[in-house]
Image: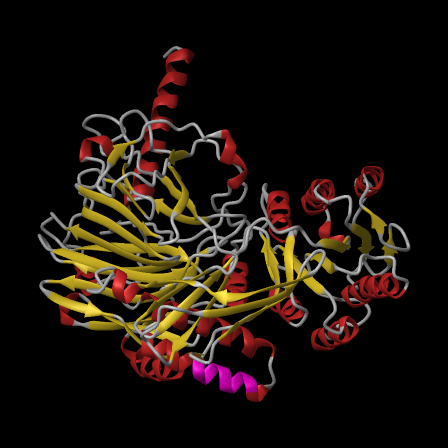
Amino acid sequence: MPVLWRVLLLWVAACICLQVQAQEALIISRRETLTQETKEAMDTKSVKKRSTTSMKMVEVHSLKVACTVKSRFSHTVITSKAVNNETFSQETFFEVELPKTAFITKFSMEIDSQVYSGEVKGKDEAKKQYDKAVSSGATAGLVKPSGRKVEKFSMSVNIAAKRSVTFVLIYEELLQRKLGQYEILTRVKPKQPVQDFQIIADIFEPQGISFVGARAPFFKDELFPSVKRSKEKVQISFSPTLEQQKKCPGCNGTIMDGDLIIKYDVYREEVLGEVQVANGYFVHFFAPSNLPRVKENVVFVIDRSASMRGTKIAQTRDALGAILKELHEEDHFALIMFDEIIITWKDSLTKATKENVNEAIAYVQELRQQGSTNINDAVLKAVSMLVSERNNMRLPERSLDIIFLLTDGVPNRGETNLQKIQENVHSAIGGNMTMFCLGFGNDADYSFLDMLCKKNKGLARRIFLGSDAASQLKGFYKEVSDPLLLEVDLRYSDNAVNLTNNHYNQLFNGSEIVVAGQLRNKDMDKFLVEVFAHGNDNDFKVQGNANVVNWDKLDPVKKILGNFIERLWAYLTIQQLMDKGDIGTQEEKSSTAAKALGLSMQYGFLTPLTSMLVTKPESGGVQRLFIADKLTEDQRQKAEKESGLDTMTDVTDDSADGLTFFAIDAKTTPSTSVSVRSTAAPKPITHLFLYTGLFPVFIILFSHSV
């Protein structure tokens, strides 16, 4: 046989093998355990092996996502029905990726007209019940880390021949405003065309929606969402037909693979903000506009130890160069590099003139890694520099002092006791500075950094390894680079009780302060608000009766999340109690944990203090108990490290390119509907789309195995 023909035949054979492998990877999933039916078949060897090419996938008959946002409070319901059209039982998987800031409130499966629902219990009580059931095959780990800002809830179940299962998952969260926008992100990945596919997002904001935009990789040709909008309401619905979802006529591949992103903001006309009341609860949204920026004095403390070698140090150089360019001329800054030795660029803080910034950028480009990690002395050096500058009156009186720590590891030189370092730093700062910490990769001790920041008016953020690490660094700095108010106190009349946190250390441009509480007197049209803070030039003080939106009158039949303000209050209270417990004494930790647990149980939230127990049917009439736990950030990091998820990737986007904007017209009636085809972003509001956060996220993945 000629050599050319031999080569050609080998190439064809290789292509066929690769294709078979790809098909198996797509439609076959490995099962942790074998069903009794399969075991018997293997023992007797009487069942022929089924061909993967002839076996049909479990059909995803319907997939519906309904996201209702009412005054920033998001309530998402995911419903999906899977059908087994085969003559034998198959296993199907239901997987949902949701924001790590969200609380699951319900999960259920309906099989043969019987509903199996998850039950939220206190973690200790659930563990006792779970441990008791372990001998009969209980399974843990329904919730696992999946992405930078999401976690995955998964459940598998056997579907009998010619039967179906319907899954329902509900979760809730308060959307956070970052850089002037709220975001809803829905990850669409059904893996096959779905007969009844629908995504609906209903947004209702009484303040008025100032802009709304959306995009997805599958928005093309004639495939675009339908939009209904008025000044206060927007409905975005997306319902592609079975044929529209297919990659090609007659094939089973789907183009529905990507992220549907919705971004919006609201009007803010009142300096006091807006108060909304319903059913004896209130919420106050405060984000004044057109305030002058407070000056910053920033000391960047950069880890250059040996573990920062390679890509980490290169990305740090790139990010620092970009961040330094963002400094305002009235700001002051300093650079500290550390391994076991502490090195300063200059002995004191320098004004951020163009000349000084360029000199600092050139210095940063020479940054090289070496040595061990002495975090304690490096941070204390930053504190002493700021204290010295303050004592010598070389910094503006009304300005914010910030320490910006970037590290990828744990201290192994100098003081290495983590608690002692926290005490040293907290004592040195004395409540006069703000500290932000960035933990680079999974070797950084996030729990330590988080505590360090919480005790010093700041917050910690994990930086994930990957090609966009520099963008993550720059994105975080962008969030905190424009302070508008410091030491913000929000006060209310005696009618408001059981308040969530009403003191905030800073208010940054593009963010929002949210305070919720209960009302002694439900019947009210006026609401006294007082806000005191430090501004750029003068003290900020406003008081008066805020505009009140009374939902009991606006929506008397409570058709749309009737008790949403009460649930928003519970959501905020639980989160803030857990944060308070992190930095409190042992007695305070026990007290706050008990209160947070009580609220979690009362409102059915799956939180780090509760567990969800799910009983599911197995073949042969056997039932197994599953347990789902909400992960803390520290637990997420450990799980990622153990599973090798060091470079988790999510959608990141710093521009408005490709967004379809839906114009909001006050004269437009709510029934107006349009199908939008333009994907060009209007230039006047492009600057509003510089940051992408992750809010409601899901993946529905159905697969099976023999």
**In the foreground, 50 or 681:** 681
Image height of 196 relative to 440, above or below: above
Give the side of residue 218 with respect to residue 357, left or right: left
In this view, 515 is above or below 263: below
Between 545 and 631, the residue placed more toward the observer is 545
- The residue that appears at 82% across and 52% down in the rendered structure is 334
Q: Position of residue 22 (x, y in %)?
A: 34, 37
Main SS, magenta region, reads helix
Query: Which quarter of the rendered picture does the N terminus lie within?
Result: top left
Residue 140 appears in the figure: no
* In the displayed structure image, the side of residue 216 where residue 705 appears, left or right: left
590 is within the stretch colored magenta: yes
Q: Residue 494: x percent and y percent? A: 46, 80
492 w.r.t. 5: above or below: below
In this view of the protein, which residue sits in the foreground, 392 or 571? Answer: 392
Residue 406 is one of the magenta-drawn residues: no
Q: Please state if 604 lies on the left or on the right of 337 as rendered.
A: left
Q: Position of residue 507 (x, y in %)?
A: 60, 59
Name the side, left or right, on which 324 lies relative to 340. Answer: left
Would residue 377 be visible to someone looking at this image? yes
Residue 138: give x, y in percent of width and height: 30, 73
Residue at position x 30%, y 43% from top? 230
Residue at the outermost bottom position: 587
Query: Range of the magenta residues?
Result: 588-595
